[in-house]
Image (cartoon, rainbow, N blue to C red):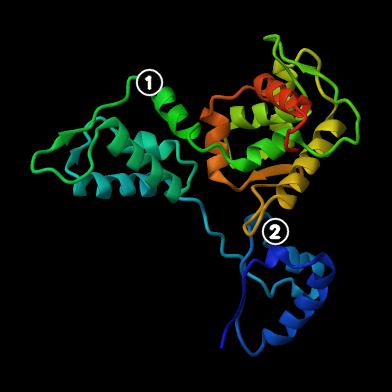
């Protein structure tokens, strides 16, 4: 009988070693499967040297553009939407590899853009929105991810004032707003420290020191972990790579109607109100 250990990345650090040794003992008699987020997948090997050569990784990749486009093809066919202009592919290219985000974009396109609520006897021609950015922004702003606010605020500073970061455009923010800006520019689920540092060096009046960037990325990961609720943390930082595990957060960072300066100002105004909720 195989043993399946789900969410292995949630196991306490001081328990991973003993658990790995127990797994090593069980391997000759049954198959053991560990399910974990990709950047934590081989912790069991690192915590038990004798496990080397006994473990094989089966990586579950994000959905490809073709796979995501297939969702649109099946749905549009069922609703008699005739897509001759490649709407399905455009939606797939902006789904960040997530099928549930693709389904939501298809739904919003069919209902909001075309007004299609049910299948029709006559084909309904697919038409592109006047502005794809406007279409995506409308969806992103409908339900901003709660974790976005936590990441933008960053950790508690115990009364210390954060250093102001000024963009070449004149916009001002702090290091966390600047990092979220850089993540949005890159627009990938996994982004390296070097990629973020390069964007900040290019777009800020004064570059941020590398140690400050890595420390802040670590703080963001801690904030995400502390506010993960019952699911996986939206953000993780490991080996100089930032992993954005929530595709809806990526979508909002890319298309949401936010700027770091505006959000910081709104937070400051709320904090000055006597009945403000922290």
Residue 192 visible within the image: no
- Crowd around label 2: few <14 · some 14–19 · many ≥20 (10 Å): some
Q: At which x and y percent is residue 233?
A: 67, 52
**Where residue 179 is drawn, which disc sits there?**
none
Asked where in the image residue 25 lies, by quadrant, the reply is: bottom right
Q: Is residue 27 above or below residue 259?
A: below
Q: At which x and y percent is residue 74?
A: 26, 50
**Where residue 131 is drawn, which disc sits there?**
1
Q: Nearer the viewer, mark 2 or mark 1?
A: 1
- Taking depth in this image into account, of 104 and 99 the one nearest to the observer is 104
Asked where in the image residue 136 lies, by quadrant, the reply is: top left
Q: Image check: 160 left or right of 254?
A: right
Residue 72 visible within the image: yes
Quick one: label 2 or label 1, which is nearer the N terminus? Answer: 2
The image quadrant where one finds the N terminus is bottom right
Q: CA distance from mark 2 to mark 1?
A: 39 Å
**Where residue 40 is drawn, which disc sits there?**
2
Q: Is residue 220 above or below residue 28?
A: above
Report helix, strand or loop for mark 2. helix
Which residue corresponds to the image point at 70% horizontal and 39% vertical from the top-left?
A: 150
Q: How many numbered marks have been drawn onto this rendered protein structure? A: 2
Q: At which x and y percent is residue 161?
A: 88, 25
Asked where in the image residue 176 lies, by quadrant, the reply is: top right
Residue, far left: 121
- Taking depth in this image into account, of 149 and 56 the one nearest to the observer is 149
Q: At which x and y percent is residue 141?
A: 50, 31
Which residue corresponds to the image point at 65% horizontal and 42% vertical from the top-left?
A: 147
Report helix, strand or loop for mark 1. loop
Which residue corresponds to the image point at 71% horizontal and 9% vertical from the top-left?
A: 170
Q: Are marks 2 and 1 in contact (CB under 8 Å)?
A: no
Q: Image check: 121 left or right of 221?
A: left
């Amino acid at each position: 009988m195989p043993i399946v250990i789900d969410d292995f990345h949630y196991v306490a650090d001081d328990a991973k070693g003993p658990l790995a040794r127990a797994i090593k003992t069980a391997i000759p008699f049954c198959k053991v499967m560990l399910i974990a987020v990709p950047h934590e997948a081989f912790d069991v090997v690192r915590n038990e040297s004798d496990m080397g050569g006994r473990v094989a990784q089966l990586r579950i990749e994000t959905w490809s553009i073709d796979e995501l486009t297939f969702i649109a093809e099946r749905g549009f066919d069922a609703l008699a939407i005739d897509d001759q202009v490649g709407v399905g592919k455009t939606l797939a290219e902006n789904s960040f590899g997530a099928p549930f985000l693709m389904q939501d974009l298809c739904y919003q396109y069919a209902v909001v853009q075309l007004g299609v609520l049910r299948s029709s006897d006559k084909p309904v021609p697919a038409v592109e929105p006047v502005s794809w950015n406007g279409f995506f922004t409308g969806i992103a702003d409908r339900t901003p991810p709660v974790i976005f606010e936590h990441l933008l605020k960053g950790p508690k500073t115990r009364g210390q004032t954060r250093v102001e970061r000024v963009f070449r455009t004149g916009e001002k923010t702090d290091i966390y707003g600047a990092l979220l800006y850089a993540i949005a520019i890159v627009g990938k689920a996994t982004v390296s420290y070097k990629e973020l540092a390069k964007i900040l060096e290019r777009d800020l009046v004064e570059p941020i020191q590398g140690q400050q960037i890595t420390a802040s990325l670590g703080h963001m990961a801690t904030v995400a972990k502390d506010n993960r609720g019952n699911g996986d943390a939206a953000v993780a930082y490991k080996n100089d790579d930032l992993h954005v595990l929530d595709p809806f957060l990526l979508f909002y960072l890319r298309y949401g109607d936010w700027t770091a300066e505006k959000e910081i100002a709104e937070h400051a105004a709320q904090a000055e109100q006597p009945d403000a909720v922290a």
